[in-house]
Image (cartoon, helix red, strand yellow):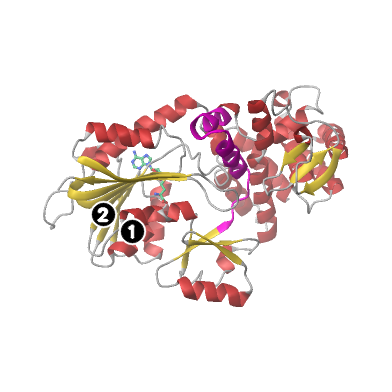
Amino acid sequence: MPRHAALRTLRRVERGARARETLDGIVRRESLSGLDGDLARELTQGVLRHLESLDHLLSAYVQRPLAKAHAVDRNALRLGAYQIVYLDRVPDRAAVHTAVEAAKSAGRPRAAGFVNAVLRRLAASVSEAGVAAPGPDARRAVPRGDGAFTLFAHDVLPHPVAEPVAYLAAAYAHPAWLVERFTAQHGADAARCILAAGIARPPVSLRPLPGHEDALAAALEERGVAYEREGPCLLLRGAGRVAALPGFDEGWFAVQDATTAEVVPLLAPAPGEGILELCAAPGGKTLALAHGVGEQGVVLAVDLPGPRLANLERNVKRRGLTQVAVLGADAADPEQLPRGLRGRDGDGFDAVLLDAPCSNTGVLAQRVEARRRVEGPHRIAMLAEQAHHLLLVAASRVRPGGRLLYSTCSIDSDENAEVIRAVLDDDPDLDLVAERLTLPVAGRRGGGFAALLRRDG
Ligand SMILES: C[S@@+](CC[C@H](N)C(=O)[O-])C[C@H]1O[C@@H](n2cnc3c(N)ncnc32)[C@H](O)[C@@H]1O
């Protein structure tokens, strides 16, 4: 059942659907148990996180290009190969058998022999799983994303010196254009770390809410849940379901990446302030803003009308944040945004936060499909242009002396520093106060960018 759910999800993702929403729908409709749902999620995310590597490895064992195979066969092969190459806990025989069964139950009984034969040959060519170092021949060592490697009996990857981009793309499952872009913008060593972060399983990252830091740490220790600190967050590994953690019902923490959690403190929201938050859904930063301004302050949280806005509204209500008002509006259209808070002095807000829609290149481990959805440099240019426009609108709502915070979860300079340069050129009354680029760290935190500007008083 879980493999069947994963297979159906992978097929729909190929046709443009979003993995998480699609799988959640299937899990609900088919009433999968908690454990089966978790396995289906693990398999789907794992295949999408390692997709380019899986296709590269499989291509050595199929006669026709994988892209031309039937969608069920192709995705059943990926499911089986993912378990063989990247998972320790599934024996190869079970990985092959369950992939064959998934293909059969998806209406491809005739593909059983083909899927079986390809996966058995792949499994037979693995010489050692989960070794700590790549050994002398990098072409035989496939990085798994957990710091370990799967060793093959023969060369399976392109030559790292003769074909560096093809090697990195195949080993770290990123499109070649993105490998080139990371290398050009951040240098070869940093690019490799970014790629490694992109295939690492993200940790469960909890940000304790103000006043609950000690209680949460003590409760986790009492329950025997191991954690490490990363910035303002606690990282948990293998801790099971978040909803079963101590403090979940009491609202002691938010599930949030450390880099994301460090954004709002840069704005330093103060008690009583009026803050405009653009692109706010689902509200990860709204909560921190609300705590900052307190019950005497106001946060006006804006996003486009639709399901994400409804989610934001639900989150605000569930937390009982009476200082937050939610508005469905297009932030690109200044006419749809208020000029400031009625009943307060002056024009404009004390502070404006714009968390712009972006390429997600800092959080590819979490957003496993993003590396394919971005398509290429032209799409990054479009996102940068959109962010530039949104930031100009955001700037128009900052009162004299007020602050403007721009953030993205991209690590691409065109969407980050270049947008800030352009806005500083356009609006001479703005000054740059601080700018921070964080690169992702495998298994610990995502990457992102934040810049704080101030309008002259
Ligand atoms: C990076 S996400 C925001 C994440 C959110 N700030 C958080 O911390 O949970 C970007 C958001 O921008 C919203 N968005 C995109 N274009 C927009 C527009 N023209 N006006 C308002 N919101 C927009 C999307 O709906 C999406 O929710």
Q: Is residue 317 above or below residue 431?
A: below
Q: Nearer the viewer, residue 30 or 261?
A: 261
The stretch drawn in magenta includes residue 152: no
The disc label shown at residue 252, or none: none
> N-terminal of the two: label 1 or label 2?
2
Residue 374 in sight here: yes
- The magenta region covers 178-204
Q: Amino acid at mark 1?
A: Leu
Tally of marks: 2
Circle 2 SS class: strand
Mark 2: few/some/many CA within 10 Å (<14, 14-19, 20+): many
The residue identified by callout 1 is 289
Q: Nearer the viewer, residue 43 or 51?
A: 51
Q: Amino acid at mark 2?
A: Ile
Residue 16, percent from left and from top: 56, 34
| Magenta-drawn stretch, dominant element (helix, strand or loop) | helix
Q: Nearer the viewer, residue 274 or 200?
A: 200
Q: Residue at x 49, y 61 (%)?
A: 233
Circle 1 SS class: helix
In contact (CB < 8 Å): disc 1 and disc 2: yes
Q: Is residue 6 above or below residue 298?
A: above
Q: From the viewer's perspective, tell me whether residue 429 is left or right of residue 237.
A: left
Quadrant in the rendering for residue 192: top right
Residue 100, percent from left and from top: 81, 40
Q: From the viewer's perspective, tell me whether residue 141 is left or right of residue 297.
A: right
The disc label shown at residue 275, or none: 2
